[in-house]
Amino acid sequence: MSDWRIEVVSSGSDQHIAAVDPLMGAMYAEMREQGPVVPLMDGGARIWLDGIRSGLERFGRLSIAISDGQVVGFAHGALKLLPEHQGGARVGHVTHVHVSPDHRREGIARALITSLDEWFQAKQVTSTEIHILVGNEAARAFWERLGYAPELVQYARRG
């Protein structure tokens, strides 16, 4: 077990934000092994990071885990609004969570989610949701341990 800490990236110019790029690539590579998923295009992580920079701490939170000076995990959460016919309430959406394989089972993912939960609570969300791949049993077990329950199944047809 290593020493690690969680930090919130509150500025798009934070020096650590670039370190999320390869972690996102690794996350998508793992996702491909678990089932069909829309792939991350070349440069996709950079495009995503560029897209969230200006809304950090207003519309989304990016939390990172740092161990021995290296970013070893990240989680991002964003605000969504329910449609008016469902009351228009604020909903938290965990968009991405990834911890490097050599740093798993240390409590890092849980700590990253706690950071998002604190932000969601401050933003007065009424519920929080996450999408996981059907074949990712480890993720399913993790989220259920955190009190999440299955709510819907999404189907997709490509092409």
Image (cartoon, rainbow, N blue to C red):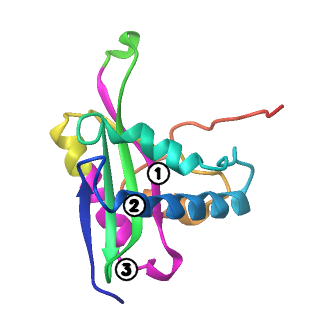
Q: Which residue is mark 2?
A: 74
Tell me: 129 left or right of 60: right
The residue positioned 39% from the left and 10% from the top of the image is: 85
How many residues crowd around disc 1 within 10 Å: few (fewer than 14), some, or many (20 or more)? some
Identify the residue at image location x=46%, y=51%. Answer: 96
Residue range in magenta is 89-116
Q: Nearer the viewer, residue 133 or 98?
A: 98
Q: Name the residue located 43 percent from the left edge and 42 percent from the top edge.
A: 50
Among the two numbered marks 2 and 1 on one chain, the one whose residue lies closer to the N terminus: 2
Q: Disc 2 marks which amino acid?
A: Phe
Q: Secondary structure at mark 3?
A: loop
User: Which label sits on residue 96?
Assistant: 1
Amino acid identity at mark 3: Glu
- In the image, residue 153 sits, relative to residue 13, either above or below, namely above
Q: Which mark is residue 106?
A: 3
Q: Find residue 11 and report its horizontal and vertical position in percent.
A: 25, 48
Q: How many marks?
A: 3
Q: Position of residue 132 (x, y in %)?
A: 56, 50
Q: Which quadrant does the N terminus fall into? A: bottom left
User: Is the residue under label 1 in contact with that under label 3 (CB below 8 Å)?
Assistant: no
